[in-house]
Amino acid sequence: MTKDPDLGMLSAQVLFALQRELFRRLAEQGHPDLRPRHGAVLAYLDPQGSRATELAYASGQHKQVIGTLIDELEALGYVQRRPDPQDRRAKLVVPTERGLDQLRRSEAILAEIEGGHAADVGAEAYAAFKAVLRRVAARQRGFEIRTGESPPVRGAAVRRGR
Amino acid sequence: MTKDPDLGMLSAQVLFALQRELFRRLAEQGHPDLRPRHGAVLAYLDPQGSRATELAYASGQHKQVIGTLIDELEALGYVQRRPDPQDRRAKLVVPTERGLDQLRRSEAILAEIEGGHAADVGAEAYAAFKAVLRRVAARQRGFEIRTGESPPVRGAAVRRGR
């Protein structure tokens, strides 16, 4: 237990502790039915709607997992599946009013949490940390793309341009 | 999808991409039966043995989850439960030879992955990044300890001193 914690340990500790705080506070603010697993969809959901393939790509989860989460969130009243106006064969996952309320509250809670960390380590150091974290995340995911392990990018690149 | 990625998104992206690379490479090196979920135990396992409560605390997972993972790893031949010589009522989770081989290989793979990131962003920037990540992880988990949401610390503090 004395060895220097590696990147996997630390990212897991940050993620799980952050999820616990976020979902506890969301529960206090009128969203008690959400679970951390739903973050794989909710964190990446475009207020105007996202395709399931985009959500799978953004979250790094398999499309089957995302499909199950969308089913759960639809049953809980957070999202609806609607035909994509740009492609009649495709479906868009669109947040409901309840979903939009959750998106706004999550964003505010996360901004407050990150504000606390930034105040603790200093704004400049925190900005530098986020920049390296973004780069490490892209590089670690890029490794997967090169070896063909990632979910499909199709759709995501197009819509990201909006 | 254009908003600045938050700490939760980025830590999830790093964790899941890192897990995929680690477990793919472990599979190639003779450990095809392990799954990313097993990392919650294996990442924190002391070669001389750890208590389940320590593993729960270190990983931030519930003790029931850790118990199930220990059962699976025992069935796969990676760990054994043995009486703790320091406390006859307690059990220690001890890696087998196969478990020790996995620990050594994981450490080497993670060191290589992190070496790649450090070479990409520069050794000094990467060290600064890790220092802030350690602090953010401790602070985010400290929030839980203050509000009593964390798994029990009992045992961990004692054994960490070894």
Image (tube, coloured by chain):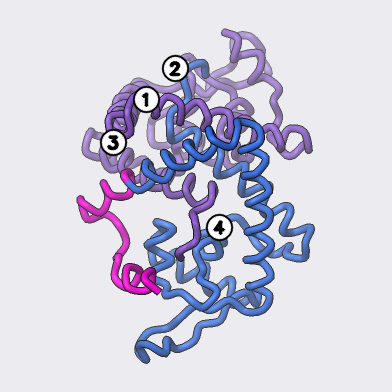
Chain colours: A blue, B purple
Rate crowding at label 1 as few (under 14), some (14 to 19) or many (20 or more) other CA atoms within 10 Å: many
Q: What amino acid is at disc 3?
A: Leu
The magenta region covers A139-162
At a point 47% along the width and 25% down the height, the residue shown is: A5
Q: Secondary structure at mark 1?
A: helix
Q: What amino acid is at disc 2?
A: Pro
Which label's residue is closer to the chain start, 3 or 2?
A: 3
Q: What amino acid is at disc 1?
A: Leu
Which residue is identified by label 2?
Answer: B47
Which label's residue is closer to the chain start, 1 or 3?
A: 3
Q: Position of residue A135 (x, y in %)?
A: 37, 43
Q: Position of residue A90 (x, y in %)?
A: 37, 84
Q: What is the quadrant of residue B50 in the picture?
A: top right
Disc 3 to disc 4, C-alpha distance = 26 Å
At a point 28% along the width and 43% down the height, the residue shown is: B24
The reply to whether callout 1 and callout 4 are in contact (CB within 8 Å) is no
Disc 1 to disc 3, C-alpha distance = 10 Å
Q: Which mark is residue B59?
A: none
Q: Can you see residue B47?
A: yes
Which residue is identified by label 4?
Answer: A37
Q: Which mark is residue B26?
A: 3
Which residue is identified by label 1?
Answer: B103
Chain designation of label 1 = B
At a point 33% along the width and 42% down the height, the residue shown is: B33
Q: What is the quadrant of residue A96 in the picture?
A: bottom right
Q: Position of residue A68 (x, y in %)?
A: 49, 69
Viewer-nearest of labels 1 and 4? 4
Disc 3 to disc 2, C-alpha distance = 18 Å
